[in-house]
Image (spheres, helix red, strand yellow):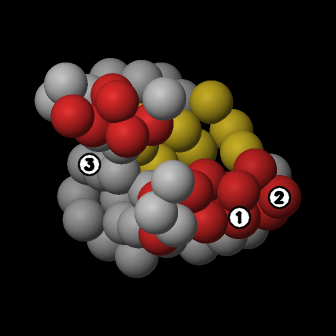
Amino acid sequence: MIEAMAYLGFSFVFDKCACCDNKLNENNVGFSYDYNGLLCPKCKSRLDNLELNKVEFAILKNLSSVDI
């Protein structure tokens, strides 16, 4: 599903902040539907997002680096 979405132009950013390209902090990360990816703490504090815990962050990070 993730590969199909990327092929259609709907890829997600899981390796850096989707808004400002900053490094992510696994203890304080959010997911933004508007930016199609994860948000760093700075961007998360000012944008609408879905808060993720460490496990959810690790799963998304693994999905982005594994060839499905």
Q: Nearer the viewer, residue 9 or 38?
A: 9
Q: Is residue 12 above or below residue 55?
A: above
Q: Nearer the viewer, residue 47 or 23?
A: 23
Task: Kindly tell me whether residue 38 is visible in this rendering.
Answer: yes
Under mark 2, the amino acid is Val
Cα–Cα span, label 1 and label 2: 5 Å
Quadrant of the rendered structure where residue 2 is? top left
What number is the disc on residue 55? 2
What number is the disc on residue 19? 3
Residue farthest to the left, as pictured: 9
Q: Is residue 26 above or below residue 18?
A: below
Under mark 1, the amino acid is Ala
In the picture of the structure, the residue carrying the numbered disc 1 is 58
The residue drawn where x is 58% and y is 44% is 30
Mark 1, Cα crowd under 10 Å, few <14 / some 14-19 / many 20+, is some
| Residue 13: x %, y % from top left | 35, 51
Q: Is residue 32 above or below residue 60?
A: above
- Do callouts 1 and 2 mark residues in contact (Cβ within 8 Å)? yes
